[in-house]
Amino acid sequence: MYKWLSCSEEQLSATGLHQLSCEHFVDPTDGVETWQVNFTSMKHVAAFCSFHSYFMGCRHGVGALRYNIGRASNTDCMVVGLPMTFKVIGNRSNGLVTTELAFATCWINGMFGTMTTPPQVRGMMRDPKHFNAVLAYAKEYLPSSHSLAAKGWKSLPPGVHTLPAHVAVPSGDSSDDE
């Protein structure tokens, strides 16, 4: 068992991380070894992030979703996207070990619910399958007490992530009418 995954068998089963496979490669030219785990479902990413159990508590995040960021007026959210790759590279000849964690984060506008991905030419969140999985995860786990949930964002059809302007900013709240 890898140190970063060390826990009881019951805890590991509950996270779903036991289903992940670890790929092992050895570069034949220099003998450098690479161990790589690819997190390809939001269930696995959420289990790895566990925002609710570490430093934020349940008032600021759950799984891979962070909300209530900063001041009370800040209703924006951040969610860790797909895929996430954890890599350990070890060179036994000189004793050097390097770790690498690669992932995308998506920002969700707290007023309209628009989910913005990182600007990328290819890969990660450019795949509509990954985008929709992250969006579905955010809709499922955003607390009902959040202002987006109160406006009906969680019940938008799959793939739709922006509230209409008249719902997001009711006419009484807008200064654009002048």
Image (cartoon, rainbow, N blue to C red):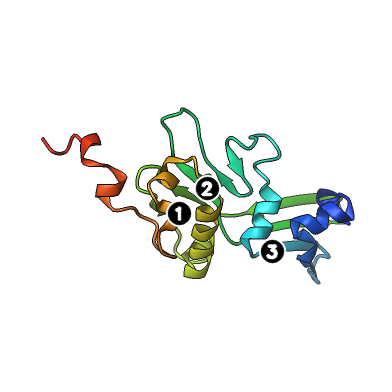
In the image, 91 versus 81, the foreground residue is: 81
Mark 1 to mark 3 CA distance (whole Å): 28 Å
The residue furthest left is 178
Up the image or down, 98 lies above or below 41; here it is above
Can you see residue 93?
A: no
Q: Earlier in the sequence, mark 2 or mark 3?
A: 3
Closest to the camera, between mark 2 and mark 3, is 2
Q: Counting other residues with Cα less than 10 Å from the Cα at mark 3, is it few (<14), some (14-19), or many (20 or more)?
A: some
Along the horizontal axis of the image, is 18 left or right of 158?
right
Q: Secondary structure at mark 3?
A: strand
What label sits on residue 106 in the rendered view? Answer: none
Mark 1 = which residue? 154
Mark 3 = which residue? 38
Looking at the picture, how far across and down is residue 43, in whole percent? 66, 59
Q: Counting other residues with Cα less than 10 Å from the Cα at mark 1, is it few (<14), some (14-19), or many (20 or more)?
A: many
What amino acid does circle 3 point to? Asn
For the residues bearing labels 2 and 3, Cβ distance under 8 angstroms = no
Mark 2 = which residue? 142
Mark 2 to mark 1 CA distance (whole Å): 8 Å
Figure quadrant of the C terminus = top left
